[in-house]
Image (tube, rainbow, N blue to C red):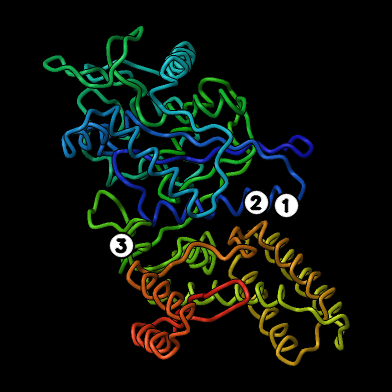
Amino acid sequence: MAGKQVGMYCCGLTVYNYAHLGNLKIYINEDVLKRALIHAGYKVKHIMNVTDVGHLTSNADSGEDKMEIGSKREGKSAWELSEHYTKRFIEDLKKLNILLPDEMPKATETVPDQIALIRRIEKNGYTYRTDDGIYFDTSKMPDYGKLARLKKDSLMAGARVEMVKGKKNPTDFALWKFSPKDSKRQMEWDSPWGTGFPGWHIECSAMSMKYLGETFDIHCGGIDHIPVHHTNEIAQSVAATGKEPVRYWVHGEFLVVGREKMAKSAGGFLTLQSLIDEGIDPLAYRYFCLTAHYRSQLKFDMDAVRSSQLGLNRMREFMERLGYITDTGSRVDIDEKSREVEAGFRKAIEDDLDTPKALALLSDFVRVMNGYIDREEIGHKDAERIYDLMLDFDKVLGLKLGERGEESAPKEVMDLVRMRSSLRDQQRFKEADAIRDKLKEVGWEVLDTPKGPKLKRV
């Protein structure tokens, strides 16, 4: 890291379908890292690629381009598909309060950069040609696989046994793939080697170099990227520049359903919208992800997500309670508790982003402070101080604790709330109370506050 400047590159989405909750867990983890760096006084230059070409269905450099598969599935061009799912991806990031990258270049926008990088690798003697494309010769990279700490002959052997004709080694990978001779692809470009398209791995090296330089600070991604994608990134970048491309690698663990990771290729994956349709605030899913360390697997469980919704609501309600305090004096000294939680929070975040511990500290702090509020022992000056302290913590957590957030109730519940408010305005209190009882029956409690009715899950 040069002074207080940090270059951070994150592997983005392959935009042939929606981002699933497993994808989004990784982006939440990365957002906490970015926020923690900013909170510590660093200026972060954040780049995230969008893969809209070249990601094949097999790590063995065979199979169909995922964009072509999506195009056939939906009856749209690959370009239309990319535009649609990129837009939806960005909408999901915003709903989760993820700070958007400084740049989100698409693979299709940087093909000239990728071609230029392949030529550098070729000039340095690391490539060979087959009938299928231009390949990287891993036998010329003695420490290939060092990121995964695996020997070359065992590296992802199971995923690469299906050898493409002409490949010299199972671990060799495509830098440039030739278009089929008997058909025209939707996405293809002229190159010094022939018409075709870039391999998946080369785009990240080309984009990171373009925006962050030949060596940068932090590269993020899912743990599944280690044995193939990031291993190949290192190899091709070193082959081109003679330098290590990345100082720190940060990898997030899977979101698992049963014993399997959540994946689009498996089908039946869950999206953020599927949670919203269940009446769950997107930031409750963010809270849920923070309950596990980023390097630990997180088991998806709807009851646990609902529990996270309650935890988030408790924090928001606490913030609202602080805003209602008007007493001029305090009868307790909050200094020690405030210093304790502030030091503990900072220590937890600095200890490899220990968000579960940070959340536990905040939950305990909220419990103690709520007790003071119940006993009317806090004045408004201390309330303001506590409020500001919580907002400072939230600069890292990104839960929008200072806002009421989106109403998470289904439309039919919100319709009942509006009907009840209308009846109360007409002083038809008996009918309004009947609606309150009906809401409780379906799992919601309506609270009347100075700022209007507020919903709370029972």
| Three-letter residue code for mark 3 | Glu
Percent coordinates x, y for residue 20 in the rendering? 35, 53
Res. 260 mark: 3
Using residue 199 as the reference point, say whether residue 99 is left or right of it.
right
Name the quadrant of the N terminus. top right
Q: Quadrant of residue 346?
A: bottom right
Q: Is residue 350 above or below residue 313?
A: above
Which residue is denoted by mark 1 in the rendering? 39
- Assign a secondary structure to mark 3: strand
Camera-side residue of 22 and 375:
375
Q: Amino acid at mark 2?
A: Arg
Image point (37%, 89%), residue name = 434
Spot occupied by residue 252 in the image (x, y as percentages of width and height): 49, 54
The residue lying at 38 percent from left, 33 percent from top is: 51
**What is the secondary structure assignment of the residue under circle 1?**
helix
Nearest to N terminus: mark 3 or mark 1: 1
The answer for how far apart the CA atoms under marks 2 and 1 are is 6 Å
Q: Residue furthest left?
A: 182
User: What number of labels is visible?
Assistant: 3
* Kind of residue sitting beneath label 1: His
Q: Where, by quadrant of the figure, is residue 129 drawn?
A: top left
Would you place residue 196 above or below residue 20 in this image?
A: above
Depth order, front residue of 46/127: 46
Q: Which residue is mark 2?
A: 35
Relative placement, left or right, of 292 versus 173 is: right
Q: Residue at x 62, y 29 (%)?
A: 215
Residue at the top extreme? 192
> Label 2 vs label 3: CA separation?
30 Å
Q: Earlier in the sequence, mark 2 or mark 3?
A: 2
Q: Residue at x 59, y 36 (%)?
A: 246
Check contact, mark 2 vs mark 1: CB within 8 A.
yes
